[in-house]
Every structure is written in structure tokens, then in C-alpha cells.
């Protein structure tokens, strides 16, 4: 997989990938502490591989561990925002 081709597929090449600078990235690499973020539109870069993120889904923070296959995608793709529908039978019959 070529990370640059995937990262730039939905955006013009001269702009480059969109990402947010995480100030505690170095601390997360050293101590294996998850990075808490609400930046769901941040593109996953190759240097994020192996890091743990807590991505906000609108209600709470979902843990996401970055693997090589996720490079080029957005952080928000891996934290589901919608709850699954479950059918509940009514008791009043």
C-alpha cells in the first residue's frame, strides 16, 4: 500500500493531507498513553502506526489503535457515531 496515494485521493495534491498537530504525540510514543481527540477529520499518517487514540463519536471517546492498513483514512471512520437499531417487542398485547 502506498500511503501518499491513499492519503491524497480525496484532496488536491498540492494541498497535501489534512492532519492536526497533536502536542502530546511524543509523550504518547514514549509512555504508550492514548491521545484524546475530537478531530475526526484528521488523516492518519504513517508515523501514527502503533499509537492509540481516543476518538470522540459525539457521546464518548472510542479507543482506536492505528495499524498499517488505516494509513490514509480519517480517524472518524473508525469510531461509529450511530447506535445499532434493536427491535423491542411491546408488552401491551
Image (spheres, rainbow, N blue to C red):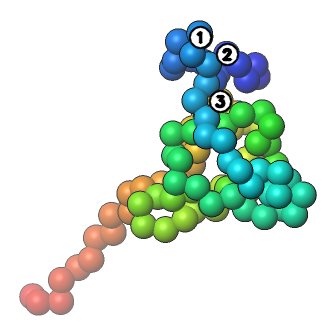
- CB within 8 Å, label 3 to label 1: no
Mark 1 surroundings: few (<14), some (14-19) or many (≥20) residues within 10 A:
few
Q: Secondary structure at mark 2?
A: helix
Q: Residue at x 58, y 29 (%)?
A: 18
- Rounded to the nearest whole Å, what is the CA distance between mark 3 and mark 2? 8 Å
On screen, 89 above or below 35? below
Left or right relative to 31: residue 10: left
1 or 2: mark nearer the eye:
1
On screen, 60 above or below 15? below
Percent position of residue 20, x then y: 61, 40
- Rounded to the nearest whole Å, what is the CA distance between mark 3 and mark 1? 13 Å
* Quadrant in which the N terminus appears: top right
Quarter location, residue 64: bottom right
Q: Residue at x 51, y 20 (%)?
A: 10
- Sequence-earlier tag: 3 or 2: 2
| Closer-to-camera residue (61/79) | 61
Q: Residue at x 84, y 62 (%)?
A: 32
Left or right relative to 51: residue 72: left
- CB within 8 Å, label 3 to label 2: yes
- Sequence-earlier tag: 1 or 2: 2
Q: Which mark is residue 72?
A: 3
Q: Residue furthest bottom?
A: 92
Quarter location, residue 5: top right
Q: Which mark is residue 5?
A: 2
Amino acid at each position: 500500500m502506498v500511503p501518499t496515494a491513499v492519503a491524497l485521493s480525496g484532496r488536491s495534491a498540492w494541498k497535501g493531507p489534512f492532519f492536526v498537530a497533536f502536542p502530546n504525540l511524543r509523550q504518547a510514543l514514549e509512555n504508550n498513553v492514548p491521545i484524546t481527540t475530537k478531530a475526526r477529520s484528521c488523516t492518519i499518517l504513517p508515523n501514527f502506526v502503533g499509537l492509540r487514540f481516543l476518538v470522540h463519536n459525539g457521546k464518548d471517546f472510542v479507543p482506536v489503535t492505528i495499524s498499517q492498513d488505516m494509513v490514509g483514512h480519517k480517524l472518524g471512520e473508525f469510531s461509529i457515531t450511530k447506535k445499532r437499531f434493536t427491535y423491542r417487542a411491546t408488552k401491551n398485547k
